[in-house]
Amino acid sequence: MTNFNFSDKDLGSFKFKIDNSTFVPTHTSNLIIKSALKIIKNEDMSILDLGCGCGVVAIIISKLTKANLNLFASDISDTVEGVVNENSLTHGISINVRKSDIFNAWSGHKFDLIINDISGVASEIAKISPWFKNISCEAGKGGDLLVNKVISESAEYLNDNGKLIFPIISFSNKESILNKARSRFNNVELIMKQDWPVPNEMLESKILLEELKKDGYIDYKFSFGKLIGYTEVYCAY
């Protein structure tokens, strides 16, 4: 395992262990954590962190809230249990962690809050991005395949009045994801949004980006000569 230093001017700095199978946290993780803290406030609840990676979301929200949280986490990675257990031990946080393909390992469980951080980036974008080195991304051409599956199935795993937090990246089919959420939940609210510059590694594939945008699979804008993407985090209930 290697060290990963999580740092955010609002959230603080934290050290984690990751391995070659672990998705490295991005600014989307930061935004999800901030959004989750807005939802949780100081309310005690059970929380499932889907696509947990090294456990960064569950661990940091637990450390930054006064609420009593019953934490669960899962990821499709073969090494997720060892990685998250080591990080939770280091930070003094108790987490029930399992290897799982979305909800497969959580049959019979229900939660007050499900936090989705499973890949939501168009597959062709994942191939040219710096985010998925050594990590597969089977999210489909619109990046909505897995997110929509989570949205469709989440109600079965939520308690009454339970909530689902999910991000939408500009490199995914936003319309498809929001339509799915609105068909499954009475309320879908935007919690936070943040713009970010498109990584330089992706600028060499400008023709691909333009084609995917034209077809409605992704979105971005130009600002001061730079390509700008965005992350939005929603709460559905």
Image (spheres, grey):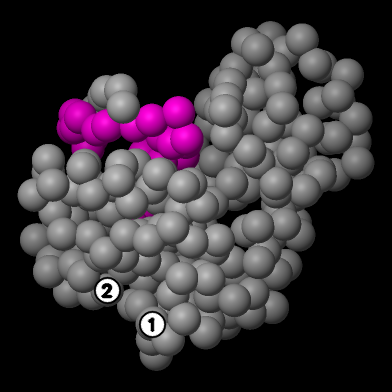
CA gap between label 2 and label 1 equals 8 Å
Q: Indicate whether residue 44 is drawn in magenta.
A: no
Is 176 placed above or below 139 here? below
Q: Nearer the viewer, residue 14 or 12?
A: 14
Q: Residues within 10 Å of mark 1 (few under 14, many from 20)?
A: some
- Do we see residue 32 in this rendering? no
Q: Is residue 46 above or below residue 39?
A: below
Question: Amino acid under label 1?
Answer: Lys
Mark identifier at residue 110 = 1
The residue under label 2 is: 46
Locate the N terminus and report the quarter of the image it occupies: top left
What residue sits 63% from the left and 11% below the top? 200
Q: Earlier in the sequence, mark 2 or mark 1?
A: 2
Looking at this view, is 13 or 75 the one in front? 75
| Residue type, numbered disc 2 | Ser
Neighbour class for label 2 at 10 Å: few (<14), some, many (≥20)? some
- Is 32 contained in the magenta span? yes
- Above or below, 122 against 221 in this view is below
Residue at the image position 53 percent from the left and 31 percent from the top: 195
Q: Which residues are magenta?
A: 10-36
Locate residue 212, reporting x and y percent: 85, 35
Q: Residue at horizontal 46%, vertical 53%?
A: 75
In the figure, is residue 12 to the left or right of 118? left
* Residue that appears at 27% across and 32% down: 17
**Could you tell me if the residues under marks 2 and 1 are in contact, i.e. CB atoms within 8 Å?**
yes
